[in-house]
Amino acid sequence: MHKWLAVLSLVCASVHAAPPTTINEDMDKLLADRGLLTHTIDQLEQVRQNVSSKASDLVVNAMGFLGVPYKRGGNSAETGFDCSGFVRATFEKTIGLVLPRRANEQAAATDQIDKTELRPGDLVFFNTMKRAFSHVGIYLGDGKFIHAPRSGSEVRVEDMRAAYWQRRFDGARRVAPIEESASKP
């Protein structure tokens, strides 16, 4: 359903971006008279707000784990987190979705997106152990992400634009159920 809404959004945007013509005005009038135009725009706005709210909740819950110590194989705030345990716990707490346990499995279970498409709540992956998708974090926006970095450290926010992270960036992924659950009534 969310793909249909995205297409409709583009169509509506292109119709309203075009110079006013009799055809466009007639089409808008017909859709408005039948209650379709207003209903569709209202639905799109509700979906946008729900997606934004889910992402906000995810980011807020992730930030609540700041300072939790790193623990290899850790998957709780009480005992500590490793990177994938942190991501898994955040998604489970926020939206009830249980992601796979390992970073490479999380990458395989999510939808690949371009780095330019990153939105808060998306996953960012890095090659930190000379193997693909060996580290994962949650994108916060403005080039920042939150993660459980390594032994002796704790959950913290870092900038993806730092040379270390730029060299090791392995890709971005989106967890589809955030959008799907947001678009359901």
Image: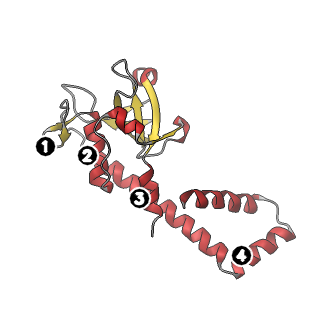
Q: Amino acid under label 4?
A: Leu
Q: Name the residue under label 1.
A: 78
Who's the residue at 45% across and 66% down the image? 184
Q: In the picture, residue 174 is in which quadrant? A: top left
Q: In this orientation, which residue lies closer to the viewer: 179 or 138?
A: 179
Q: Which of marks 4 and 1 is nearer the N terminus?
A: 4
Query: In the displayed image of the protein, which residue is found farthest to the top?
Result: 130
Q: Which of marks 3 and 4 is nearer the N terminus?
A: 4
- Residue bearing the label numbered 2: 89
Can residue 21 be seen here? The reply is yes
Is 108 left or right of 3, judged from the image as shown? left
Residue 142 visible within the image: no
- Find out whether the residues at labels 1 and 2 contact each other: C-beta distance under 8 Å: no
The amino acid at mark 1 is Glu
- The coloring applied to the image is secondary structure
Mark earlier in primary sequence (1, 2): 1
- The CA distance from mark 3 to mark 1 is 27 Å
